[in-house]
Image (cartoon, helix red, strand yellow):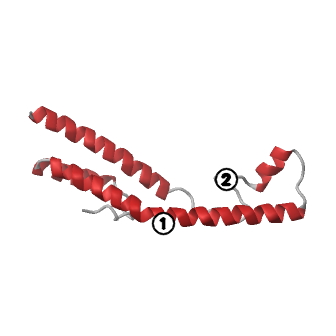
Amino acid sequence: MSTWKNILAVISIFVLGTVFGLVISRQMSPGPPPPGGRGPMLSLPQLDRFLDQDLTDEQKREISKILEEVRLELEGLRKEARPEIDRKMHEARRRIREILTPEQQEQFDRMIERDRPPFDRRFRP
């Protein structure tokens, strides 16, 4: 039975580590691009190449405005979702700790603390 608990603990730690890694990698991604600059969406140079022609100044202004509006909307959505993501991560950690022995909980807490960037303290027990 103890072997199964150990296997479950290892699997739980792996899953939680993967989830934490995804969240942290998103937090460490570069900030929003400057208006009209390169970002995860289309940029003006990409659009120029796609259309295989130069855009007029007016087209560039309008497209820059559209891209900036969408960037701000997406930034707002990320900010809205962040508290729920944090709650889910905290809940996952709490649930995993419930099935661990006290010794495993100590190991788990040390692993979480060790793998957490020094600036990120949201997932503290």
Residue type, mark 2 in image: Met
Whichever of callouts 1 and 2 sits on the residue coming sooner in the sequence is 2
The residue sitting at 21% across, 41% down in the picture is: 9
Q: Is residue 115 left or right of residue 100?
A: right
Quarter assignment of residue 2 = top left
Tell me if residue 23 can be seen.
Answer: yes
Q: Residue furthest left?
A: 1
Q: Which residue position is annotated with label 1?
A: 80
SS for callout 1: helix
Confirm whether residue 34 shows in the render: no
Q: Amino acid at mark 1?
A: Glu
Q: Quadrant of residue 69?
A: bottom right
Q: Which residue is mark 2?
A: 41
The x and y percentages for residue 93 are 27, 54
The quarter of the picture where residue 65 lies is bottom right
- Residue 52 lies left or right of residue 40; in this view the side is right
Kindly report the distance in space between the C-alpha atoms of the residues bearing marks 1 and 2.
20 Å
Q: Position of residue 34 (x, y in %)?
A: 68, 65
60 displayed left or right of 11: right
SS category of the residue bearing label 2: loop
Residue at x-position 73% and y-position 63%? 66
Q: Tell me which residue sits at (26%, 43%) in the image.
A: 12
Quadrant where the N terminus lies?
A: top left
Few, some or many residues within 10 Å of mark 1 (<14, 14–19, 20+):
few
Q: Position of residue 37 (x, y in %)?
A: 72, 60
Viewport quadrant of the C terminus: bottom left
Residue 68: image location, x then y, percent: 69, 65
Closest to the observer, 109 or 60: 60
